[in-house]
Image (cartoon, rainbow, N blue to C red):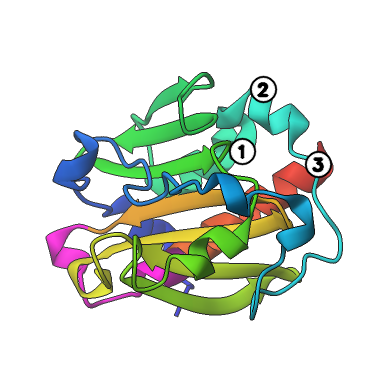
Amino acid sequence: MIVSLGAALLMLAACSTTSGGTPVPVSSAPSVSPSATASDEVPGPGVPKVANPVDLTTLEQSPCNALTPTQVAGLLGSGVETKPEPGAGVGPVCNWEAPGRAGIGIIFGKLDKRGLTRVYAEKGKAYPFVEPLEPVGGYPLAAYDGLGDRRAEGECTVAVGTSDTQTIDISVNQSEKNIGKSDPCEAAREVTAMVLGNARAN
């Protein structure tokens, strides 16, 4: 139940040790195959087509505008530290970290031009865990992780297809006392809805 989403995200926990303490989607750096980046190869088999692509140009320039200050405060409470990395190698990044090591991480991926096809194609390979989720506002969504299904550990990364060639990747991590009380992928899905709304308004 997502009625208490704000409280659930406020209790987001320490980030994966593989990301150095910041809630960047730890498994979102795509594996790029030079032979699999042509636009005529997407979407791949079983991958939903994005009917109404979203122009991400504005948010890519200022990735921390993906969430408004009011939204961030509602999700994470007060004392949030915002960490933009518009020039990150994987693509524009923003991390929000609150006291108690709560946080959200967002990447506008730039290393691969296959969109969600990249996630589906790496199921059982780079991403042992890939699970399609209900679309958000008509935009296809999938949870994935390079370390397996970690929902039981309170961690989830999702990729939403904003076009057939591009995704936004969003990660959340829950605190130990919140693990098992709510689905971290549902929390990530709710954040995705906010980000898409802001992207379409820009």
The residue indicated by pointer 2 is 61
Q: Quadrant of residue 68?
A: top right
Q: Position of residue 194 (x, y in %)?
A: 63, 53
**With respect to residue 11, does 110 lie above or below?**
above
What is the secondary structure assignment of the residue under circle 1? helix
Q: Which kind of residue does numbered mark 1 sit on?
A: Ala
Query: Crowding at label 2, few (<14), some or many (≥20) Cα neighbours within 10 Å?
Result: few
| Region rendered in magenta | 175-187
112 sits to left or right of 198 = left
**Disc number for residue 66:** 1
Q: Residue at x 43, y 49 (%)?
A: 31
- In this rendering, the label closer to the viewer, 1 or 2: 2
Q: How many labels does the image show?
A: 3
N-terminal label among 1 and 3 = 3
Between 51 and 31, the residue placed more toward the observer is 31
User: Of circles 1 and 3, which is in front?
Assistant: 3
Q: Is residue 173 above or below residue 46?
A: above
Give the image location of residue 2, x and y in percent: 47, 73
- How far across and how far down the image is residue 135, in percent? 65, 74
Residue 11 makes an appearance in the image: yes
Residue 55 numbered mark, or none = 3
Query: Which amino acid, mark 2?
Result: Gln
The CA span between labels 1 and 2 is: 10 Å
